[in-house]
Amino acid sequence: MAHVIAIANQKGGVGKTTTTINLGACLASMGKRVLIIDADAQGNATSGLGIQKAQVEQDIYDLLVNEVPIQDTILHTKNENLDIVPATIQLAGAEIELTSQMAREMRLKLGLEPVQDDYDYVLVDCPPSLGQLSINAFTASDSILIPVQSEYYALEGLSQLLNTIRLVQKHFNPNLSIEGVLLTMYDARTNLGAQVINEVQSYFGDKVYATIIPRITRLAEAPSYGQPIIDYDPKSRGAEVYQDLAKEVLEAHGK
Ligand code: ADP
Ligand code: MG
């Protein structure tokens, strides 16, 4: 059975998509079968893995709203072992359309069932909001990986996220846990960084990954070439840190 991890933080620009793409590609390169679910209408995980949106015929919207079988939405990426359910801008309508539908919170969970045994890890790239799409992601997931940007007010807004997690645990998914908290875009040149690390560690304790993702220009460049960092610049610091993160994730699951 696949382990399903939602990558979530309702703040935009904290590194959710970068983490989804690069953690996914690193796990795949280590021989794990990985499916990425792009649950953000911006479709950045889709384009960041080299998929042209104009060529997408059926996407996550069709899976969630029209209950199209997941097999009809999955695309292979250029990376071995790495598949994706893409997103296009039509997903923007899903929040409202799902509101009037039956079992709306369960759509992704039910949609994933047919391929549960085809993958070792499913990573869901969540949108920057706590609406129906995130609720679907949390209901379908075993755990949540929270990227936190290393900046002032890093913890701001996280209580809202934790509240939503609690609500989903109570109503839809009692087994949902926190996979880990990942510090991103760390800038060693400022004193601020160390202070933020302390603050986040005192709040989340051993849930915080030992791996910290620095601010690295190459990581921001890779998506415009449609490549994960391990392909765009395999020997770079960015490739190294995301491989470290993948090892931590594998160790946590004993595989
Ligand atoms: P989110 O999905 O949370 O909105 P993204 O992963 O899209 O965040 O990151 C926001 C922006 O910051 C993107 O332009 C991305 O390329 C860039 N970025 C993400 N992580 C890093 C990093 N470690 N170093 C430098 N730039 C980064
Ligand atoms: Mg994103």
Image: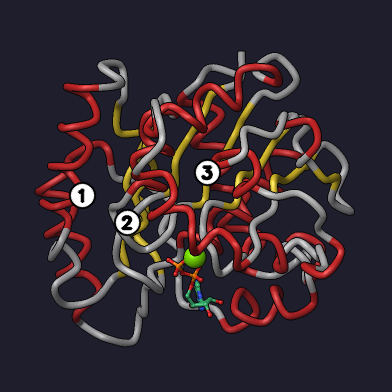
Q: Which residue is mark 2?
A: 9
- Disc 3 is placed on an element classified as strand
Residue drawn at the location 69% of the way across and 53% of the way down:
86
- Disc 1 is placed on an element classified as helix
Labels 2 and 3 touching (C-beta < 8 A): no
Q: Nearer the viewer, residue 225 or 172?
A: 172
| Marked residue nearer the N-terminal end (1 or 2) | 2
Q: Position of residue 49 (x, y in %)?
A: 75, 61
Q: Nearer the viewer, residue 177 or 172?
A: 172
Labels 3 and 1 touching (C-beta < 8 A): no
Q: Position of residue 27 (x, y in %)?
A: 68, 39
Q: Which residue is mark 3?
A: 124
Amino acid found under the numbered disc labelled 1? Leu
Amino acid found under the numbered disc labelled 3? Val
| Marked residue nearer the N-terminal end (3 or 1) | 3
Q: CA distance from mark 2 to mark 3?
A: 12 Å
Q: Quadrant of residue 120?
A: top right
The image shows a total of numbered marks equal to 3
Q: Position of residue 153 (x, y in %)?
A: 14, 73
Classify 217 as above or below 50.
Answer: below
Labels 1 and 2 touching (C-beta < 8 A): yes
Q: Which residue is mark 1?
A: 161
81 horizontally vs 163: left or right: right
| Marked residue nearer the N-terminal end (2 or 3) | 2
Mark 3 residue crowding within 10 angstroms, few (<14) / some (14–19) / many (20+): many
Mark 2 residue crowding within 10 angstroms, few (<14) / some (14–19) / many (20+): many
